[in-house]
Image (spheres, rainbow, N blue to C red):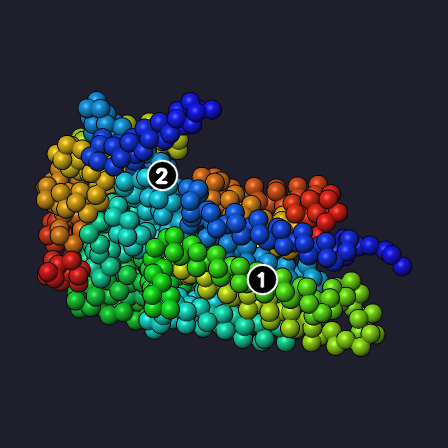
Amino acid sequence: MTTITDNAIATPRRAVRDEMIALAVMTALLAVVPLTGVYPFFVMQGLCFALLACAFNLLIGYGGLLSFGHAMFLGTAGYVTAHALKVWGLPPELGIVLGTLAAASLGVLTGLVAIRRQGIYFAMITLALSQLLYFVYLQTPFTHGEDGIQGIPQGHLFGFINLANPNTLYYVILAGFLLGFLVIYRAINSPFGEVLKAIRENEPRAVSLGYKTDHYKLLAYILSATLAGFAGSLKVFVAQNASLTDVHWTMSGEIVLMTLVGGLGTIYGPVVGAFVIIAMQQYLAGFGQWVTVIQGVIFVVCVLTFRRGVIGEIAHYFKRSL
Amino acid sequence: MKNKISALLLGTASLLAFAGFASADDKVVKIGSLSDQSGLYADVGGPGSTLAAQMAVEDSGLLNKGWKIEVISGDHQNKPDIGSNITRQWFDVDKVDVVVDTPNSGVALAVSNIIKEKNGIFLNSGAGSSDLTNAQCSPNTIHWTYDTYMLAHGTGSALTKAGGATWFFLTADYAFGAALERDTTAAVIAGGGKVVGGVKHPLNTSDFSSFLLQAQASKAKVIGLANAGGDTSNAIKQAAEFGIISGGQKLAGLLMFITDVHAIGLPVAQGLNFTETFYWDANDQTRAFSKRFQDRMRNKQVPTMSQAGVYSALTHYFKALDAMGGNSHDGAKIVAKMKEMPTDDPLFGKGSIQPNGRKIHPAYLFEVKKPSESKGPWDYYKLVATIPAEEAFTPLDKSTCPLLKK
């Protein structure tokens, strides 16, 4: 009766305390970044990808659904936000809302189709849908094909916060990241999250207990899509462009990689994983296209030697949930 | 303990003082060669452009006058977002002063925006889009070697006059292809010709069969290739396999580099017409430079016009810095000085820079030699016509650059 699995270790109270300490440490570390001389642009990019990986992790780590098309939410939100800012001249907050909404609606549409299958079939359907969208974006005039939407004005958030100032932008992005992160944290630690975990562990048993598992899975999928889109909208302000890279399937693969390296099914794992991968891309950029090869090797090493990911292994060692 | 703290404070203070000193006029220059280092434009720019930049530094004579000049390189992989990231980091972290080369107009336009924001200097040699000195011109950008207007008016007009009345375009689907098709269409219509159709292909395509069949079916007299580098040589090779040239249609490689001709081989490339602004075998000075260049290149290629443009642009930049007596790190100011001075270098001869950032020099219409005419490796071109600088590039009164309307 007292079988303990990785995710239900110790008493809930102690787990919550540990997680709160970790949250406080992470927030404090991130808040002082502009004072340390670390390149803020790099950290902002990392934050956007961290939120994206967390959204992805919500789906696979807690719902057991491997989506191989999360780039479509990132890219769609990016394009919509970029277009709203540049062509329609909307203020940043409206741009973000529109981009996130676009990703959410896309989540509803693709979710209704994809959620009907499980495992590899689910992954393949999401991949197919995202590839479909990739070619749509390659051809539609508003995305400007290979060039992408460039030179996007950053504007003033709520009319008075100047996003062109790197430090201001940094704290806005950090706030956005924390907001998304807390939403995910709340979802995981709610009855909804518990049901998701139950579905992940044993779907037929969840069904037999009277849960409509499809509803839960669809809701998790839409929530994940929305947050991934939110990350995509934020990224537009950092990169000041929206391009095909963000909808390409390799991006979907990178999201999986980030989550695996950091630790699947851990709350902080995807954040660490995102920073590891972004740092690799940043500091190994000199190797050009060899970066992909190096990433592949790291992926293999990760799967062979520390399967729980960086945070997963630490949590396992200390028998804590992180 | 106290000693340690005061030593630390002293150290910090002297660092700050040093940083303050570095921001005034100094003699330190950092050059970033941003290019496609491994893809379809790597032979056109790539490592060769970095070498050309290095040679410009060595030949400038500034090193003997106590200047410290460093050249670094980056690979934008033909992606505007990667190019933007590298550029932003170069200016923010690595304190780069000037970015050179940058083929791929999509990347170049993105980079130009960022360099304007950072008040750096962009000496573009590799990209083609004439938008760089028209609608999207910048006080920090000089477009050095060639542009789509020049290609269109050199090759497009010449072929239309020679009887190519109907055209079909095979266009690379990004900023450069669009600009080249637009400018060539204008030149063809001005010459009394007609465009009967066109098809867009993705950048870096390896299979052109479906596009070539459409071009063949159009029965246009000329098939205009509005693409570059690996795409152009692939299209030409495959067109030969489809019997398009023997079927009576003429191919117009609107942008060709000597490395493309080398890749295609004279038997297939012979008879092609195109416009360039530099040929290694033009005179003694270009031959001398090319010999030195070839000796240091790993694949022993001669310089392309892009690579020669990097050398020429940096040579002029160093002259401006020398005249100013130090590097103020104020991009717009240095570019303004460069525009004031007439240009003169061994590779492009005498020329000037227009207020919109367009460097002008004569352009040459070449024809690829027959295999029997070629006397040795890289002896590929014969000169058909020389287009004077004023006619080769967009006339100032037709430029839509906002900088001109003051």
Residue placed at 31% from the left, 40% from the top?
A: B96
Residue placed at 12% from the left, 62% from the top?
A: B405
Indicate the quadrant where residue A17 lies: bottom right
Q: Mark 2 highlights which residue?
A: B94
**In front: mark 2 or mark 1?**
1
Give the x, y percent position of residue A193: 70, 66
* Dot 2 crowding, Cα within 10 Å, few <14, some 14–19, many 20+: few
Looking at the image, the residue that sits furthest to the right is A1
* Amino acid type indicated by mark 1: Leu
Distance in Å between CA atoms under marks 2 and 1: 36 Å
Q: Is residue A2 left or right of residue A66?
A: right
Give the x, y percent position of residue A233: 46, 64
Residue placed at 36% from the left, 39% from the top?
A: B94
Q: Nearest the camera: B370 or B352?
A: B352
* Amino acid type indicated by mark 2: Asp
- Mark 2, secondary structure of its residue: loop
* Dot 1 crowding, Cα within 10 Å, few <14, some 14–19, many 20+: few
Residue placed at 51% from the left, 44% from the top?
A: A279
Q: Is residue B205 left or right of residue B297?
A: right
Indicate the quadrant where residue A221 lies: bottom right
- Mark 1, secondary structure of its residue: helix
Give the x, y percent position of residue B328: 20, 38
Q: Nearest the camera: A174 or B289?
A: A174
Looking at the image, the residue that sits furthest to the front is B2
Up-down relation of residue B92 to residue A87 (above or below): above
Q: Nearest the camera: A29 or B4?
A: B4
Label 2 in the same subunit as label 1: no
Q: Quadrant of the C terminus of chain B?
A: bottom left
In contact (CB < 8 Å): disc 2 and disc 1: no
Q: Mark 1 highlights which residue?
A: A182
Q: Is residue B187 left or right of residue B238?
A: left
